[in-house]
Image (spheres, helix red, strand yellow):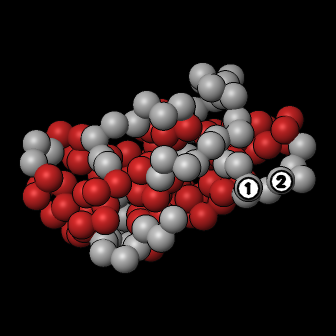
């Protein structure tokens, strides 16, 4: 069973040293987690869903522990350049649907990510942990 991405993020935020953050990243190395980290640290990403918390109903935690692992590959739909012809209202509805299917902790974290309020990691640490991964 994979850990909650929000759990890994919490561990990264609590880590005091760059060395410890790199250890955490490498211990959780997975293509999906790397992709999530790219959304986290890429300064060029512009989210196309409104800032703030939309109205959504959190799911039951025990039903959604690994769901975000499968949803990360779909985050491109919510950022500039990802699905340019998608109707904005449809995009917002899809984002709410995502929030309602992932673990509540992951949903809160996604909202922070979208609003640029997710702290605890930077581009340099990701580049050091995963050399050659970030190519933008």
Image side of residue 94 versus residue 100, left or right: right
Q: Position of residue 63 (x, y in %)?
A: 52, 49
- Mark 1 and mark 2 residues within 8 Å of each other at the beta carbon: yes
Numbered disc 2: secondary structure: loop
Numbered disc 1: secondary structure: loop
**Residue 66 appears anywhere in the view:** no
- The answer to which quarter of the image holds residue 1 is bottom left
Q: Which residue is mark 1?
A: 81
Image side of residue 81 versus residue 20, left or right: right
Q: Position of residue 50 (x, y in %)?
A: 69, 28
Image side of residue 37 versus residue 83, left or right: left
The residue shown at (32%, 49%) is 122
Q: Position of residue 81 (x, y in %)?
A: 73, 55
Q: CA distance from mark 1 to mark 2?
A: 6 Å
- The answer to which quarter of the image holds residue 52 is top right
The residue shown at (79%, 38%) is 93
Q: Position of residue 21 (x, y in %)?
A: 18, 54
Q: Which label sits on residue 84?
A: 2
């Amino acid at each position: 069973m994979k850990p909650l991405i929000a759990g890994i993020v919490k561990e990264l935020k609590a880590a005091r040293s760059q060395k410890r953050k790199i250890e955490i990243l490498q211990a959780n190395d997975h293509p999906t987690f790397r992709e999530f980290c790219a959304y986290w640290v890429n300064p060029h990403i512009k989210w196309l869903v409104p800032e703030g918390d939309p109205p959504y109903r959190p799911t039951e935690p025990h039903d959604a522990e690994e769901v975000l692992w499968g949803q990360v590959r779909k985050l491109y739909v919510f950022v500039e350049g990802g699905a340019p012809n998608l109707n904005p209202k449809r995009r917002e509805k899809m984002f709410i649907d995502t929030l309602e299917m992932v673990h509540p902790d992951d949903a809160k974290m996604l909202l922070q990510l979208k609003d640029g309020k997710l702290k605890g990691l930077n581009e340099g640490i990701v580049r050091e942990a995963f050399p050659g991964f970030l190519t933008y």
